[in-house]
Amino acid sequence: MKKLILLICIFVLLIAATGAVSADNPAPNSFTISGYTNSYDYKIVSNGRNTKFDLLAEGASTGDLQGPFTFEEWGSVDFNPETYQGSGNGTNNGMLTITNGNDSNSQVVIWFGGKSTLYTVAGTWKVVSGKGAWRDLEGRGEYTGDAGMVFSVTFTGEFND
């Protein structure tokens, strides 16, 4: 009988602990942005192959941070878009702003930077600031995805709120 009571007590504690954990709002761990480039400017520098670029993009974020986004990205690539000469390898940096799809007063700004090719991007990211429901959100991690006028990039990492 004592073993049965002990077993029931342990079972009740486990259920209570599970309820407490699920009641807490877990921090997000990944999200994906899918969108399109709506402005692209470039300048070919003196060696004839290295090209500096600056672009603006927008779209929707899905996963743990859901809502519309905009970003500005800049960088350089070993490629001349007029002569098609170069390796296509380069670097990219940018600032991504996601607006909460359920609360337009909540936004998070994320810096990202890494390496790129003509077809892919990969690097690291860090939360810079937040407001509204996302004001205390902190985090960092990695991203990988497609490069191009239409793209999809997945961000993974750790968030704390």
Image: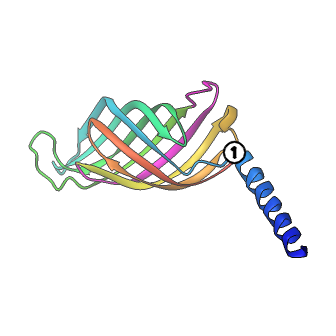
What residue does disc 1 label?
25
Q: Quadrant of the N terminus?
A: bottom right
Badge 1 local density, few (<14 within 10 Å), some, or many (20+)?
Answer: few
Q: Depth check: give the residue in front, 127 or 80.
A: 127
Q: Depth check: give the residue in front, 76 or 20.
A: 20
Question: Which residue is the extreme one toward the left?
Answer: 83
Question: Which residue is the extreme one toward the top?
Answer: 104
- Across and down, in percent, residue 36 comes to 32, 32
Element type at mark 1? loop
Q: Residue at x 62, y 41 (%)?
A: 129
Q: Residue at x 28, y 35 (%)?
A: 150
Magenta stretch containing residue 74, yes or no? no
**21 sits to left or right of 32:** right
Magenta stretch containing residue 109, yes or no? yes
Specify the amino acid type for callout 1.
Asn
Q: Residue at x 36, y 33 (%)?
A: 35
Q: Quadrant of residue 130?
A: top right
- Across and down, in percent, residue 56 comes to 37, 32
- Across and down, in percent, residue 30 comes to 51, 49
Does residue 66 lie above or below 15 as drawn? above
Q: Residue at x 65, y 45 (%)?
A: 137
- Across and down, in percent, residue 29 comes to 55, 51
In magenta, the rendered stretch is 100-118
